[in-house]
Image: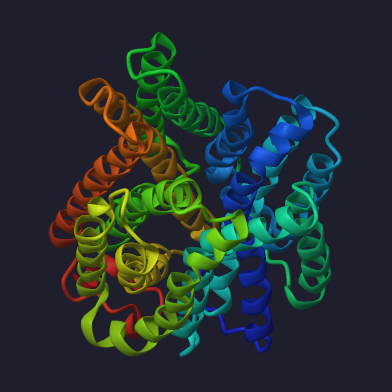
Amino acid sequence: MPAAGSHTAEPNRWAVLALLGVAQLMVVLDSTIVNIALPSAQEDLGFSTENRQWVVTAYALAFGSLLLVGGKLGDLFGRKWTFVGGLIGFSAASVLGGLAPNFEVLVIARALQGVFGALLAPSALSLLTVTFADSPDRAKAFGVFAAVATAGASVGLLLGGLLTDILSWRWCLYVNLLIAIPAAFFALRLISNEAHPQRPRIDWLGVVLACVGLFAIVFGFSKAETDSWESAVTIGSLAAGVVLLVAFVLSQRRSANPLLPLHIVWDRARGGAYASIAIAGSSVFAVFLFLTFFMQRDLGYSPLKTGVAFLPMTALIFIMAPTLQTKVLPRTGARVLIITGMTLGAISMLAFFAQLSPSSTYAANVLPGLLILGIGMPCIFAPSFATATLGVDRYEAGVASAMVNTCQQVGGAVGTAVLSTIFASSASNYLTDHAGAPGLASAAEIHGYTTAFYVATVMFGVGLIVAIVVLPRRLRPQQQPAGEPAAELA
């Protein structure tokens, strides 16, 4: 089978990059754009606060549990058709959600978005991998793609606030139609399909074990956030997920046509990149979740103003990611950049966000931390995205790309559950310990935020250790010989 690097770069590769960037932006911003719209949707449809989290969780469950299958289908039947099918299905599900007359239809629509997102996201990254496989512009392309993927969440906050304030929460779903349909049209013209020439059999045992195991893990962490870590459902789901994923790994070692060829993740460079993506994703979640609450509840910002407040970080990400990928990575390798990013992430959390107080201001206490993250996050995600798919066979690019998205999704679920639980516990303890103090509610809430930011600091510290220990020292993706496994350069 030809290696990924053996394929001549597509002549229209920059148009393909633009198309893939737009599709990736739609998938990434969909999580935060819906979060901004949730209060308005709840008021309009009349569902309870307890049920509100299912609008987010339904998407996460479907998306996270089906990513590996979506990536494998692209490898077997052609990424063009999984990409186009994902775009069309995602837009149809978005329209259904926008038209939702009740809570139940909205949750079903969000689950369907997750299903088609699991086709779309790995197809986009794997198409990028094979399109620029033998091109000197590979580094620049991955830098642009990483910038879109990293900054998309904050773009979603801005766009969600704008649409909710000016139109309605339903347009936070309708907007996907305006993105997906033109993208599908251009995909049909720009992308040529390439199916696996031998079309091996699908590993159905692996499919069941992976899907159910990932579903149980994401569901367990979601229940931990809304119920408790001691809940029987939480413990049972997480335990079942671990057992099923262990069984999945064992089955992949024996399968003739594995869903996830284990050499993809056992490679030090790719394995370290996947771990870095998961850890950074779970850590930085604190920024979007708790800073959004802080700016709206304590600084009195509107949804739109909150989105604008994240723009300095977003702008830095868009500037830094391509620059780091093309100018710095060839000289330093991925390891140095990821170590730098983890360090900057820990500094932003510890020195700024963990020091918030009722008297804090945006300019003095929030903006500096966002600017540091605007430099630190592309240091992690830009080299990680490129390294995670480096050296894989072109017919395994889809499943390697799916692992990137799986790590992001599971990392986000872990971050949501852990940090939200810590926030709630810390705020509750503060209320108990300071009963009767003036401004107690606001002070307790901010104490919960800062405690969560301290834990996020520890998460970045863990990521720093992983980068130091796991990632090889001399890996330089731009200098990688075509088709040579990344670990051989370690």
Residue 364 figure quarter: bottom left
Residue at 52%, 26% in the rendered image: 212
Residue 324 figure quarter: bottom left
Q: Nearer the viewer, residue 33 or 271?
A: 33
Q: Position of residue 164 (x, y in %)?
A: 72, 53
Q: Name the residue furthest top.
A: 232
Q: Is residue 171 visible?
A: yes
Q: Image check: 335 left or right of 142?
A: left
Across the whole image, how many numbered discs are drawn on residues? Answer: 0
Q: Position of residue 86 (x, y in %)?
A: 72, 53
Residue at 17%, 53% in the rendered image: 461
Q: Nearer the viewer, residue 356 or 188?
A: 356
Q: Nearer the viewer, residue 54 or 187?
A: 54
Q: Image check: 462 left or right of 482?
A: left
Residue at 47%, 42% in the rendered image: 258
Q: Is residue 86 visible?
A: no
Q: Position of residue 31 (x, y in %)?
A: 58, 49
Q: Position of residue 156 (x, y in %)?
A: 60, 59
Q: Is residue 3 shown above or below 406?
A: below
Which quarter of the figure is the C terminus placed in? bottom left
Residue at 66%, 69% in the rendered image: 22
Q: Image check: 303 left or right of 391?
A: right
Q: Image check: 403 left or right of 114?
A: left
Residue 478 figure quarter: bottom left
Q: Nearer the viewer, residue 50 or 70?
A: 50
Q: Is residue 245 shown above or below 30?
A: above
According to the image, what is the colour scheme of the structure? rainbow
